[in-house]
Image: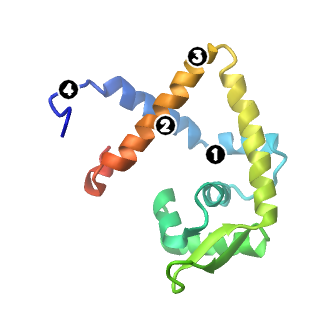
Amino acid sequence: MQHAHKKYDVTDFHGALLDILSVMNQPQRDEVLLAAADVKLDQALFPLLVAIGRYGPIGVVDLADRLGRDYTTVSRQVKRLHEMGLAKKQPAERDKRISEVSLAEQGKALTESIDDARQRLMNAIFADWQEEEVGQLFRLVRKYAESVKAKTPPEEAQTA
């Protein structure tokens, strides 16, 4: 490993990540975002819809893994989204035995409304920041995310 000799104290950084995740996982935050987007959707389905929009087409097993949920639960929720006309299932292009899920047109419209509301809410948070600071934050968070995805062995990902 190229920079293995460096020893960073990640205590504050880890604490900040936990603070962010704690706030983002509060059901009230989802309620605020859905209300700002004028979207009526069961809160249990909200993260699933957003994840399908972000990663789809995606296999149901992979989707469950990304959300940290049980496959059978996600499969039932995908079925509900399908019945609501928000998602569609199709065989995977690479392996027809595997089902993939993607957004239906109505689901795309909802996620676009949610994305617009997220933009407004996040821009309000950054209102007092310098434009350069916001750009640096976005760039460094993306860099960190890519590093974590590329360099963290799966068995170590559980403890990161």
Which residue in the protein does label 4 denote? 7
Residue 23 is drawn in which quadrant? top right
Is 12 situated left or right of 129 in this image? left
**Residue 77 coordinates in the image, percent (x, y):** 64, 69
Residue closest to the eye, 6 or 31 = 6
Residue at horizontal 51 percent and vertical 38 percent from the top:
22
**Residue 14 coordinates in the image, percent (x, y):** 37, 31
Residue closest to the eye, 154 or 79 = 154
Instruction: Give the CA distance from mark 4 to mark 2.
Output: 22 Å
Which residue in the protein does label 2 denote? 142
Q: Mark 1 or mark 4: which is in front?
A: 4
Label 4 environment density (alpha carbons within 10 Å; few <14, some 14–19, many ≥20) = few
Which residue in the protein does label 3 denote? 132
Quarter of the N terminus within the rendering = top left
Q: Amino acid at mark 2?
A: Arg
Instruction: Give the CA distance from mark 1 to mark 4.
Output: 36 Å
Is 91 situated left or right of 71 in this image? right
Q: Mark 2 or mark 1: which is in front?
A: 2
**Residue 33 coordinates in the image, percent (x, y):** 73, 41
| Residue 52 sits above or below residue 132 on the image | below
Dot 3 falls on a residue whose secondary structure is helix
Residue at horizontal 51 percent and vertical 58 percent from the top:
67
